[in-house]
Image (cartoon, helix red, strand yellow):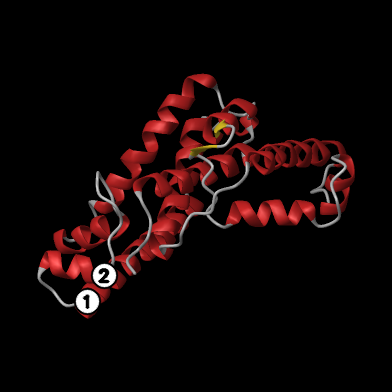
Amino acid sequence: QGCGLSLLDLINEGNLGLLEAARRYRPDRGVKFITYAVWWIRQAIMQALASGGGAVRLPIRKARLASKIREMRSDLAQAQQEEPSNDSVEEALNLQPGEMEEILRGLGAQASLGAEGEGGDLLGLALAESSAIPSADQDLIRNAFREEVERLLDHLKPRERQVIEFGFGLGVEEPQTLEKVGRRLKLSRERIRQIEERAKQKLRLMARTRHLKEFLN
C-alpha cells in the first residue's frame, strides 16, 4: 500500500491541531490566535505526513462530547487552579467511567473531524463551538490547511514530492499504491518505497527541528 492519505485527510489532521490549539490558547499571553493555531495545525499535518496513518471517522455525538470535554476541562482547571482528573470531568458531564479516555483516543487516531457525514460538517461544528477562535480567523485557518501542505512539500526534491503526492492522492487524484506509483514513474516498487521513506524522514526531521525552534523562541 501507499501512504493512504488524501488531501482531505491531511486537512482533517490539521483540524485536530486546531482543536488542540483552541484548548490550549490563552489570550492573556499576547499571542494572536491565528499565529498560535497555525503552529498546531502545522505540527498535526507534519505528523500525519510522516506517519502516513489512515483516517477514522468520529461520530457526531462523540465530536460534540469531545468539544464539551475540552470546555469542561478548561472550566475545572480555572476553578481548581490545576489540571482536572479524568474522573472529575466525567462526573461533571455525567459520562460513564472510561468514556472520556475512549473519546479522546478516537480523536488521537486521526479522526476525520472535517469530513462531511452524518450530522453535517464537523469542522464547522468544532469552529462554532470553540469560543477561543475569533470568527474573523476562521476563514484564514481553513485556507492555512492547504497552504501548509504545499509549503511543506516544497522542501522535498522533485521525485520525492511526486512519490508523496501520488501516494497521498494530493490534488485531484486518489491515493495510489507503491506498485501503481512505480509503474507511473517507471521505477520498482522497492525503489518507490525507499524514496517514500526518505521523504518521510525529511518531514519528521523538519517537524522536530521546527518544534525545537518554536520552543527556543
Report the front residue among 26 and 173: 173
Give residue 104's position: percent from left, percent from top.
68, 52
Image quadrant assignment for residue 190: bottom left
Residue receiving disc 1:
189
Give residue 65's position: percent from left, percent from top.
72, 40
Q: Is residue 168 left or right of residue 15?
A: left
> In what quadrant of the picture does the N terminus appear?
bottom left
Image quadrant assignment for residue 69: top right
Q: Work out how far the residue at label 1 is from the one at label 2, CA to CA, in angstroms.
A: 6 Å
Q: Residue furthest top?
A: 136
Q: What amino acid type is highlighted by mark number 2?
A: Leu
- Count of numbered badges drawn on the protein: 2
Give residue 36's position: percent from left, percent from top.
51, 38
Q: Residue furthest left?
A: 186
Q: Quick one: label 2, few (<14), some, or many (20+) residues within 10 Å? A: many
Report the front residue among 62 and 118: 118
Q: Sequence order check: which comes first, mark 1 or mark 2?
A: 2
Q: What amino acid type is highlighted by mark number 1?
A: Arg
Q: In the image, what residue occupies the spot 57% across and 57% down?
A: 109
Q: Dot 1: what SS?
A: helix
Residue receiving disc 2:
178
Q: Residues at badges 1 and 2 in contact (C-beta under 8 Å)?
A: yes
81 is higher (above) or lower (below) than 196? above
Q: Dot 2: what SS?
A: helix
